[in-house]
C-alpha cells in the first residue's frame, strides 16, 4: 500500500538483510514473533502440490521477514520445523479445519481419550515443556499430518495437542466438545469446526491474541477505518518513547486487519529480529507492541 509522501520520506527502504549462520537464533525469534501477529494472510488450496506450498511459504518468509536467502534457510531443520506443514500456513491461526471427516477420522483421538481420560493434567496447564503428563498422539484428523506424532494432554475435558514449539512458545490444536473454558495459560484460541480449535501460548505474556469460542462471531471493527498514514504516525509516536528508537533509522510496513493496522517498523539496516510491530485499532488505540529484539 502506498504511504503519504512525508511518511515515505521517513520510512525509506534501505540496506539488505544479514542472514548468515550466526544469526540463526535471531531468525527463529523473528519467525516465532510473527507467528503471533495478526490474522491469517494465506492458506493453500487443496489442489496445490506440497512442493508448491513450500515455495509459497518460502516466499512469505522472504517478503514478510525480509530474508533474502530464504531458500537456504529453509534447508536448515530447526528453521524448517517452525512450519508444521505448508498447508497449515505460517501463523498460529492459519491451520485449516480437519481435512479428514470420514467415520474413522477420530478413531485414534477417541482411543487416546478413552485410555487416558479427560484430565491427565490435574494442576494448571502451563507451558508444554513442564507438563509431565503429556503423551505422544498419532492420527489427528488432518491428512497432511495423519502419520506424525505430537505431544498431547487432556486438561479439564479439553484435549490439547502441541504441533510446534520453540523454547516456551507453543501452538497447536485442541478438541473441546463441551466448549469448556480454556486454561488461563492459553493466550489465544479460535474455533475451526466440529469442536476443534487452534491455540497459541507465546512466551511473552504481553502478546494479545484473539479468543473465540465455538458459536461466537469473529469480532469486527465498527465505525470508520483509521487510515494507513494515521496508523503509522501513531506507531512511530508510540515507539519514540524508547530512548534507543530513532525515527530516521527506520522503515515501515503496514497491513490492514479487521480490527485496525499491524505496523511493522524495521531498524535499518534490517536484521531478521530488528523490528517492532505495533497493532493499532481503527479507533487509534495501541493494542499490542511486539519487539523482535
Image (spheres, rainbow, N blue to C red):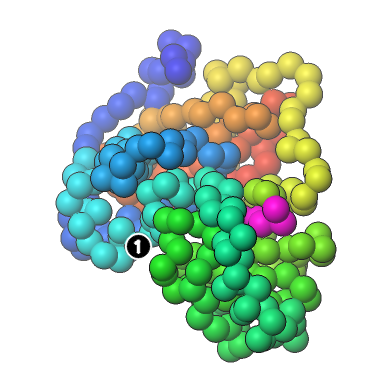
Q: Secondary structure at mark 1?
A: loop
Q: Which residues are magenta?
A: 194-198
Q: Residue at x 52, y 50 (%)?
A: 99
Residue 30 image offset from top left, x and y in percent: 40, 52
Relative to 290, say whether 199 is above or below.
below
Q: Residue at x 62, y 79 (%)?
A: 112
Foreground of the two, 55 or 127: 55
The answer to whether residue 234 is seen in the rendering is no
How packed is label 1: few (under 14 Cα within 10 Å), some, or many (20 or more)? some
Is residue 246 rendered to the left or right of residue 57?
Answer: right
User: In the orientation shown, which residue stands out farthest toward the front?
Assistant: 103
In the rendered image, which quarter contains the N terminus?
Answer: top left
Query: Is residue 280 left or right of 123 when viewed as pictured?
Result: left
Q: In this view, which residue lies farthest toward the top?
A: 5
Name the spot of residue 255 as percent of width and height, x first: 51, 29
What is the tally of numbered marks visible in this picture? 1
On the question of residue 73 being in view, the answer is yes
Image quadrant where residue 126 sits? bottom right
Q: Is residue 141 above or below residue 273?
A: below
Q: Answer with left or right where residue 59 lies relative to residue 244.
A: left
Residue that carries the numbered disc 1 in the rendered image: 81
Front residue of this view, candidates 249 and 76 = 76
Residue at 38% across, 49% down: 86
The C terminus, quarter of image: bottom left
Please identify the dominant SS of the magenta region. strand
Rendered residue at 64%/33% (across/down): 280
Residue farthest along the bottom direction in this orientation? 132
Locate residue 211 relative to residue 246 in the image: left or right.
Answer: right
Task: From the top left corner, tell me how far across and down residue 80 is, in percent.
Answer: 30, 58
Along the line of sight, the residue nearer the viewer: 240 or 43: 43
Give yes or no for residue 32 being in the magenta stretch.
Answer: no
Question: Is 67 or 16 nearer to us in this picture?
Answer: 67
Amino acid at each position: 500500500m502506498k504511504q503519504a509522501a512525508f511518511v515515505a520520506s521517513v520510512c525509506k527502504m534501505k540496506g539488505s538483510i544479514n542472514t548468515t549462520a550466526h544469526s540463526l537464533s535471531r531468525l527463529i525469534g523473528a519467525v516465532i514473533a510473527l507467528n503471533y501477529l495478526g490474522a491469517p494472510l494465506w492458506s493453500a488450496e487443496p489442489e496445490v502440490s506440497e512442493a508448491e506450498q513450500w515455495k509459497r511459504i518460502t516466499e512469505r518468509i522472504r517478503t514478510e521477514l525480509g530474508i533474502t536467502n530464504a531458500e537456504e534457510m529453509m534447508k536448515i531443520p530447526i528453521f524448517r520445523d517452525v512450519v508444521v506443514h505448508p498447508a497449515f500456513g505460517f501463523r498460529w491461526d492459519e491451520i485449516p479445519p480437519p481435512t479428514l471427516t470420514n467415520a474413522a477420522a477420530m478413531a485414534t483421538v477417541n482411543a487416546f481419550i478413552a485410555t487416558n481420560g479427560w484430565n491427565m493434567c490435574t494442576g494448571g496447564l502451563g507451558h508444554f515443556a513442564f507438563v509431565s503428563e503429556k503423551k505422544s498422539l498419532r492420527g489427528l484428523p488432518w491428512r497432511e499430518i495423519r502419520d506424525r506424532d505430537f505431544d498431547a494432554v487432556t486438561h479439564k475435558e479439553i484435549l490439547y495437542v502441541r504441533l510446534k514449539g520453540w523454547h516456551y512458545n507453543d501452538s497447536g490444536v485442541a478438541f473441546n466438545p463441551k466448549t469448556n473454558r480454556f486454561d488461563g495459560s492459553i493466550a489465544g484460541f479460535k474455533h475451526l469446526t466440529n469442536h476443534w480449535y487452534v491455540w497459541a501460548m507465546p512466551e511473552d505474556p504481553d502478546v494479545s491474541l484473539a479468543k473465540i469460542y465455538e458459536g461466537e462471531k469473529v469480532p469486527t471493527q465498527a465505525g470508520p477505518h483509521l487510515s494507513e498514514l494515521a496508523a503509522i504516525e501513531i506507531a512511530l509516536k508510540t515507539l519514540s518513547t524508547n530512548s534507543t528508537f530513532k525515527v530516521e533509522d527506520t522503515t515501515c510496513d503496514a497491513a490492514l486487519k479487521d480490527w485496525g493496522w499491524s505496523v511493522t517498523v524495521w531498524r535499518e539496516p534490517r536484521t531478521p529480529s530488528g523490528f517492532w510491530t505495533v497493532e493499532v485499532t481503527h479507533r487509534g488505540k495501541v493494542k499490542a507492541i511486539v519487539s523482535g529484539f
